[in-house]
Image (tube, rainbow, N blue to C red):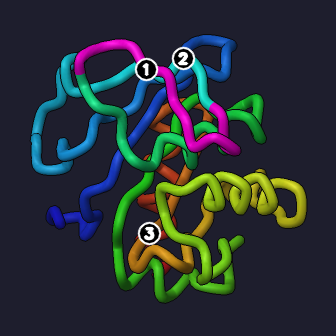
Amino acid sequence: MDASRIGFGNLSIRDGATNGFYITASATGGISELTPAHCARVVAYDFARNWLRCEGSAIASSESLTHAAVYESEAKAGAVIHGHNLKLWAALLGHAPTTSKAVDYGTPEMAYEVRRLFKTTDVKSGKIFVMAGHKGGVVTFGKDLEEAFTVLERAIGNE
């Protein structure tokens, strides 16, 4: 966890107007300056098959389907941040849109839960949700990384 109390996670940016995206690779959380070599380009996915097709040499984050569900559910989303912050997670649990505690991270079920949040909650307006079954897991999104990070910083400032 860094000085801003944001723990490791992953981030992604949409690949133009498509549902494809670039996402940080597995095990890159401790790297202070990422390069393109630390990212994978997700070009196709299938929730039901728990399947991704990626380009590049990096192994895409296990949270790729969660990011895909955000992009699929919100056309205006250009970036997604998934971080860990126990205090923020506890403060938002049940108050912000929240996935089921029974659903594990990195699974097709989590992708379906994210889609459910977009259909049944106001997650589009707040641009933040909590992963109840993933202790500390919080996800923000925005038109770009700057907006997604601003949402996260604002939430931390309000905890």
Q: Which residue is mark 3?
A: 137
Q: Which residue is mark 2?
A: 43
Q: Which residue is mark 1?
A: 54
Q: Name the residue type under label 3.
A: Gly
Q: Nearer the viewer, mark 1 or mark 3?
A: 1
Please provide percent x and percent y for residue 75.
76, 29
**Side of 42 relative to 123 (left or right):** left
Q: Residues within 10 Å of mark 1 (few under 14, many from 20)?
A: many
Q: Residue furthest front?
A: 49
Is-magenta flag for residue 51?
Answer: yes
In this view, 79 is above or below 16: below
Give the quadrant of the N terminus. bottom left
Please provide percent x and percent y for residue 154.
49, 63
Q: Name the residue type under label 2.
A: Val
Identified at 47% across, 50% down, the residue is 150
Q: What span is in magenta?
A: 46-57
